[in-house]
């Protein structure tokens, strides 16, 4: 089973109430090979919500509120789900402070990307789950 960012499957769980539908991810879901998860919602954040970025080990939203706890709790819930259904791989939305696996934003809310991982991507990898981004999905894999 493959854990997939819910927004990649077409769920409107993004901070702005929209999604990041990716047809390959939706195909995996329809074939019952994937399970969608949105760590930020699982961490208790509502949708839509104020966008957040990682800054100095903390997650801060654009209103300058510390939402680290929500992100950590969401990551733990995502890991719990991954273990329950025995996921060995996760396809997560790159750039997100939860799901990013190659890059994240630098915490300045200016759109500047830096190398780094989101809180959930990091926790999954620490627990032996391979994380790839939607950009790394090749045709053979799906
Ligand atoms: Fe998508 Fe992950 Fe953000 Fe949820 S937390 S909207 S699944 S990128």
Image (tube, helix red, strand yellow):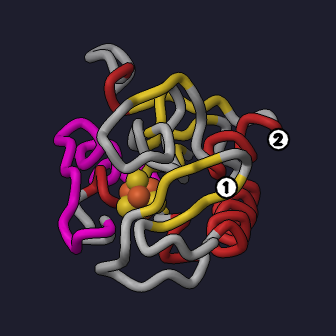
The numbered disc on residue 39 is none
Look at the picture and state if 125 lies above or below 58.
above
Q: Nearer the viewer, residue 76 or 52?
A: 52
Indicate which quadrant contains ligand 1.
bottom left
Task: Give the residue at x 33% y 14%.
Answer: 140
Left or right of 136 in this view: 55 = right
Rendered location of residue 109, percent (x, y): 37, 50
Q: Examine the structure image and report whether residue 32 is included in the region drawn in magenta.
A: yes
Q: Is mark 2 within 8 Å of ligand 1?
A: no
Q: Nearer the viewer, residue 74 or 129?
A: 74
Left or right of 54 in this view: 114 = left
Real-space Cα separation, disc 1 to disc 2, in angstroms: 10 Å
| Residue 104 seen by the camera | yes
Task: Give the residue at x 36% y 32%.
Answer: 112
Q: Nearer the viewer, residue 42 or 114?
A: 114
Rendered location of residue 74, percent (x, y): 64, 69
Quarter of the image with the C terminus is top left
Q: Secondary structure at mark 1?
A: helix
Look at the picture and state if 12 lies above or below 56.
below
Task: Give the residue at x 58% y 44%.
Answer: 118
Q: Is mark 1 within 8 Å of ligand 1?
A: no
Q: Secondary structure at mark 2?
A: loop
The image quadrant of residue 46 is bottom left
The numbered disc on residue 127 is 2
Q: Examine the structure image and report whether residue 20 is included in the region drawn in magenta.
A: yes
The numbered disc on residue 82 is 1
Give neighbour class at mark 2: few <14, some 14-19, many 20+ (Cα, 10 Å).
few
Which region shows up in magenta?
15-35
């Amino acid at each position: 089973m493959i854990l997939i960012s819910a927004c990649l499957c077409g769920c409107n769980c993004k901070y702005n109430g929209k999604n990041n539908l990716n047809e390959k991810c939706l195909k995996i879901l329809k074939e019952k090979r994937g399970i969608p998860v949105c760590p930020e919602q699982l961490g208790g954040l509502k949708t839509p919500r104020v966008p957040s970025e990682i800054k100095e080990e903390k997650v801060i939203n654009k209103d300058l509120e510390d939402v680290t706890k929500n992100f950590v709790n969401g990551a733990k819930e995502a890991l719990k789900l991954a273990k329950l259904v025995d996921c060995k791989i996760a396809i997560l939305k790159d750039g997100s402070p939860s799901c990013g696996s190659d890059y994240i934003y630098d915490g300045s809310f200016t759109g500047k990307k830096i190398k780094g991982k989101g809180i959930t991507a990091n926790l999954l990898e620490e627990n032996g789950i391979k994380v790839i981004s939607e950009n790394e999905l090749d045709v053979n894999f799906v």
